[in-house]
Amino acid sequence: MYVHSITEFIETLRAQEDLESYDKKFLDDIATTFLEHDGLTSLDSTQIEFLVEIFNRRWNNIKDTPKDYTLCDDFINRVWAKLAEELASELRISFISVLIPSIKNRIDPITFTKLPSNYTELQQLYLSHDNSTIHSLNNLVTRFKEGNYSTYGDIRKVKPRALSPLEMSRIRAKVTGLPIVCDSQCYTNFWSFVTDRVFPLWQKEGELPSMVSSLSDVVQSYYENDLNTSDGVYRFRKDLITWSENLLCYPLKEVNHLYGISITISPFSSRYLAEILSDALLVNPILIGESIKAIAIWLALRDPSLIIRTPALQATYFELRVGPGFGAREFLEGIKTLFGNDDKRFERELTALMVSVQEKIQSTEEQFVIDPSDLQRLKIIYGQRWEIIRGGVLDYTQTQTGSNSNWIRLAQLLAGAGYLSYNYYLFLMPSIRREFEPISLETISRYPLSHYILSESGRDLIFLGTCAAADGRLFNFNQASPSELTTLERNRILCADGRYLNLLDKRCPEDPPISIRTVNAIKRVLDDCLYARDEAQKLASEYALLEFYPFLRQISEDEKQRLYAQKINYRGAVYSFKNIMEEIEKGECITAHLRCLVRLVVDYLPDAKFSLQVESKVPLAEIRKYSARKVLREYEDIDVQEVKTRLLIILFSLLTHEFDYLPLTGWKISACGRSNTVPKHVEPIFRLIAPLVTKNFKGVSAQRLRHIYGQIVEGVIKPTLEDNGWNSWFTLFEGTKAWMNSILSGTLFKNIHWYEPATFLYAFLPLTRTNSLKNSIEDFLDYVVQIHIHSENMDWQRLEVNFRFAQIIKNAETPYKTQILDLLAATKLPKDQRLLSHLCMDLLIHRLATLGASICESSARFFGYTHRYSPEIYRGIKTKLEKLVGETESSLGEMLPILHRSLHCLAENTLAYERIVSYWQTMTSQMVKRMPIEGDVMGKQYVSVLA
């Protein structure tokens, strides 16, 4: 950029006759700096900085005036804009950053779209309340037409807020604007649209904010300052802007409801409060005197303690009989309203007080002034009443209607007239010890009674607005060390203003789970933002962070609350996500705070892989070592037994499934006496599950189980399937992908041959008596029972039994295999916690009865003896044993001794007895003291021959 460009700029502007004085001064300063230089000389950095400062000074002069760039498109502004574009090109920045140097944003906070890059579109922008953010009016119009009556302070704000009076005034100042069509109705500009369509809706929604009484401070400022001077106007507008800044901290619907209040100016006209407030910042305040007076009347009628101290309103207050217009006669009328059905106990005192006031009115020349002695008597009555109603249904904080409304209103009238302290709550409730709310430091009467609850001691008013602002923490902040609300105090919230009832529902876990989508969004920000090295990376980092804010705005309110409640333990300090984001929004040490979020991601996904910059700069090994292993929201409600079953099935499948893999790339895994070779992609899954099963899940919490299952799915399977790299393409076979997808879809858990031990017994036990499969399945069922007898760990039993069954099915012929699997598929277990024990006992009884039903007979063949099965003896033994164990509902372990003691009674010959003893010792590992079978010579001889 050359000096001749500056020379042309000066000459062009000096040719204008309507140049403002400040522009003349700026041109003189520029001329002094540049005219002595050759036109072909390039501008140095000092000269460019000087020009940028000139632009800054000019903006401060024209902001919120008719010459404001966002309002005025005249020739002079265009010349300045052209110079700004040339400077911006030289500096490689946005021309708005030169034209309005205080502007910090380059994209619109509502839609995250780029701001205009040329001057002709500036008139469709408006300046935010903070004077450093600029917004697109078109985007605001679209948002309002969609029914979202809010904006965002800047791009880093997640929570929407109401428009401020200052922003409204800046929008109203636009003489021209795009017409708005809504429901076939055309409006000339945005302001006519909100006045006709939006403000009436705000009246019907929401409630007045708790700080509405502070509006009286704005009205007081209007009358206190000399509005004929620029200093007076400045002070009044400053007070209004300060008040509106506090107002914007309140819930959106409450602020909009206040804006939508209709203020009656005269019997024939009314205006919305938003119109009056924006007028105060847009036109000469003297011109809105009637509107301000109307606000004062509205405040006094709503709460007669809110009286503006000014002679200008004295006549008005006399007409309303409030403030200076409240005298002895009005006092007498007020006392009369205190008589009621629920207050008959004070009728005598009130009657005596009325007589006293009446006498003074008739006997004194000054009939208007209230006698101090009468006030003292009324104070005593109020005190006595408070002691009776304190903490009860008629407590002023719980009930403001009925007879209470009269007692409250008289106190307000006396406070407004100056007979009581402005803080009239102390008159209503003498036991209260504090005049100020401890957090806001406002007098307690600033907030409505319904926004307080009485402490259990009866000495403090607890402002629920503070609890709401503290993320719903129910504390009494009146004490030096805040304490949690007692049960009684919590119950009193039920009688407070309805907007605080949700405080009782906010007892969410200290660190509630968040979704995988949220965790991945945080991880993307960290990968793109942390440790950006060059300018390109820094620019990408900035946009990555900005992209995170739309995500925060779009997630559900419940998910947002969960996210903001996250606790992050990083290097000995505990942070919350909310605190971290607040610091990032301020621009405070962004890198340091983003490092804390690495810990949050690792707490959910310990094996998550980050970008190279993050992996090399952040001590991830240490962070992973101390991961909190939190449960993702998608897995927090899975039944713990279901999680165990899924983990067992996955391990079972890992050890039995035949995976495909390249030669020399397989990983050998071993557990539970079994081994298999698997691809490297699934080996991490085995590492997560095997230690749990080896320890029989002992000491493993439900949260830990859910975390591990979530880690398998979200930390191993999904990243593997989403990996499009060359290595994955070459080594990950379709069969392995299908196996992983079966876990995601749940088909693995439905289609695999995995059954409960009780299912085998329930399905196969009837076959041991009649079916041709008897001999094939008796050994397997014996194994099922044997496992159950020798181990109390059901999870290990399930795994072992299914391993044995898998081997049987693998070696079985097709017809047999099909018959068995169809039978199992059709089996439905009854709901009985002792079912497995009973089935095991049924099998033992059946097997013992079968062995005991063997009879030896003489024969000419095979050493002279043979044996046969006796159904009669079988039924007799079975009935006998069933009767013995049927007398108890105990577990299998308690029923086994009963059978053990009965073994010698089960056989009628030595051969059968030996078989019973051998079977029993095999099944239970219990030695049996053999007892001779009297008279069984044949059986003994047969046994000796076999020996």
Image (cartoon, rainbow, N blue to C red):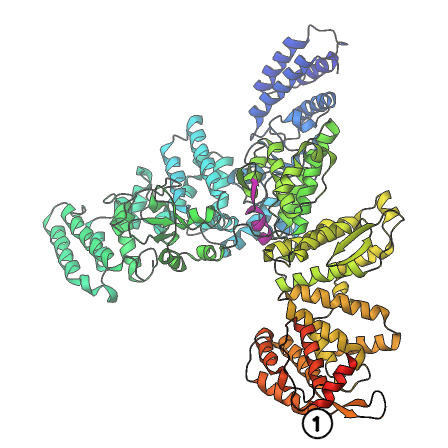
Question: What residue lies at 71% left-to-right and 49% top-to-bottom?
Answer: 715
Residue sitting nearer the eye, 686 or 852: 852
Q: Could you classify mark 1 by the number of other residues whose Cα lies within 10 Å: few (under 14), some (14-19), or many (20 or more)?
A: few
* Residue 885 counted in the magenta span: no
Residue pushed farthest right? 663
Residue bearing the label numbered 1: 872
Q: Examine the rendering and report whether any part of residue 114 can be seen.
A: no
Picture coordinates of residue 794, whole percent (x, y): 64, 66
Instruction: Say which quadrant the N terminus sits in.
Output: top right
Picture coordinates of residue 687, whole percent (x, y): 72, 51
Q: Secondary structure at mark 1?
A: helix
Q: What type is the residue that disc 1 sits on?
A: Glu
Main structural element of the magenta stretch: helix, strand or loop? helix
Residue sitting nearer the eye, 792 or 553: 792
Residue sitting nearer the eye, 474 or 384: 474
* Residue 568 counted in the magenta span: yes
Question: What residue lies at 77% left-to-right and 69% top-to-bottom?
Answer: 805
Q: Residue 588 is drawn in which quadrant? A: top right
Q: Examine the rendering and report whether any part of residue 532 can be seen.
A: yes
Magenta span: 557-569
Question: What residue lies at 74% left-to-right and 67% top-to-bottom?
Answer: 802
Picture coordinates of residue 664, whole percent (x, y): 88, 47
Question: Does residue 183 lie above or below 626 as drawn?
Answer: below
Residue sitting nearer the eye, 410 or 610: 610
Q: Is residue 424 left or right of residue 684?
A: left
Q: Is residue 912 left or right of residue 55?
A: right
Question: Does residue 870 lie above or below 590 as drawn?
Answer: below
Q: Is residue 200 left or right of residue 228?
A: right
Question: Does residue 12 lie above or below 374 as drawn?
Answer: above
Residue pushed farthest top? 36
Q: How many marks?
A: 1
